[in-house]
Image (tube, rainbow, N blue to C red):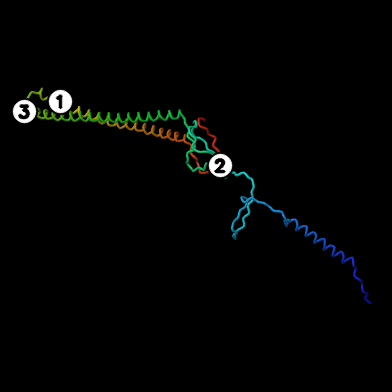
Amino acid sequence: MDSLIPKKKWWFITRWWWLGVLVLAGTGAASLYWPRPGQRLHVAASRLTISPVTQGNFQEFTAIDGVVQPLHTVYLDAAEAGMVQQVLVEEGATLTAGQPLLRLANPDLQLEMVNRETAVYDLMNNLRNTRNQLLQNRILRQNQLADIDFQLAEARRVFDTNQVLYDQKVIARQDYLQSQNAYRYQRRRRQLTQQTLRQDSLAMQQQLSTMQESVQRMTSNLALMRRKMDDLLLRAPVGGRLSSLAAEVGRG
C-alpha cells in the first residue's frame, strides 16, 4: 500500500530565497534608470529641436568622414604659349561650357598678327590700284581704237573717191596710190590696236586673278592667326566645378 511522504521544509525555504534575490535584482536595475530624488539633467535650449510629430518614412543619417572624387576630370591645356595677363575665375567656381578662364599675352604672336594684317591691307590696296590702272589703260586703248576707226573711215572715203576719179582719169596715179596706202595703213593699224586691246584684257584678267588668289590666301592665313589669337583666351571645355587653377598674373 502507498505511504504518505512528508514535504521537505528546505525546498519551500529555497524557493522563497530565490524569489527574494530576483526582487532585489530588479529593484537595483530599476534604480539605475529611475532618477533619484533631487537629481536633474540640464540641456541647453539651443541643442534641442522641437517639431510636431508627423507620420512618414523613417530616415536615419550617419555622419562619416570621406573624400569626394569627381566622376570625370578634364585637364585644361593652352594651345598657344603666353604670359598670364588676367585671371577671370577663382578655384571652386561652377563653370559653363565656353566660359572664359584665363587671358594670356603673347607679344610675338600679336606682332605677327599686326604684320600679316598690314600685308593683307597693302595687297588689297595694290589690287585695287592695279584694277583701276588696268581699267584706265583699257579705256585709253578703246579711245585709241575709236580714233583709229574714225581715221580708217576717212581714209576709206578718200580712197573710194580717188578710185573713181582715177578711173575717170581725173587725178594722177600718185594721188590714187597715196590714198590707197593711207587706207591700208589705217586698216592695219586698227587690226593691231584691236589685237593689243584683246591681249591687254587677257593680261588684266590674269593679273587680277593672281592678285585675288593672293589676297584670299593671305586672308585665310590671317583668319588662322586670328584663331590663334582667340586661343590666348582660355575657355572651359565643359561645364562643371573648377577644382584647381594654378595661374598667377605675370607668369607664363
Apparent side of residue 162 relative to residue 111 in the rendered image (left or right) = left
Name of the residue lying farthest toward the top: 174
- The residue depicted at 55 percent of the width and 35 percent of the height is 246
Around disc 1, counting alpha carbons within 10 Å, would you say few (fewer than 14), some (14 to 19), or many (20 or more)? some
Left or right of 34, for residue 87: left
Q: Secondary structure at mark 3?
A: loop
Disc 1 residue type (three-letter): Ala
Image-quadrant location for residue 122: top left
Q: Position of residue 182 (x, y in %)?
A: 15, 25
Q: Amino acid at mark 2?
A: Thr
Compared with 31, 98 (above or below) is: above
Identify which residue, 196 or 235, lies in the foreground.
Answer: 235
Name the residue tied to disc 1.
182
Q: Are marks 2 and 3 in contact (CB under 8 Å)?
A: no
| Circle 3: residue type | Gln
Name the mark nearer the viewer: 2 or 1.
2
Which circle marks residue 168 in the picture? 3
For residue 147, which quarter of the picture? top left
Q: Secondary structure at mark 1?
A: helix
Q: What whole-number distance in Å separates the C-alpha atoms at marks 2 and 3?
A: 109 Å
Q: Residue 199: in sight, yes or no? A: no
Disc 1 to disc 3, how far (Cα)?
21 Å
Q: Which mark is residue 73?
A: 2
Where is residue 26? Give x, y as percent.
78, 60
- Position of the N terminus, as image quadrant, is bottom right
Q: Relative to residue 8, is residue 112 depicted above or below?
A: above
Residue at 10% x, 25% y is: 176
The crowd level at tag 2 (other Cα within 10 Å; few <14, some 14-19, many 20+) is few
Lower sequence index among marks 2 and 1: 2
Q: Which is in the foreground here, disc 2 or disc 3? A: 2
Residue 215's spot in the image, x, y percent?
36, 32
Q: In this view, which residue lies farthest toward the bottom?
A: 1
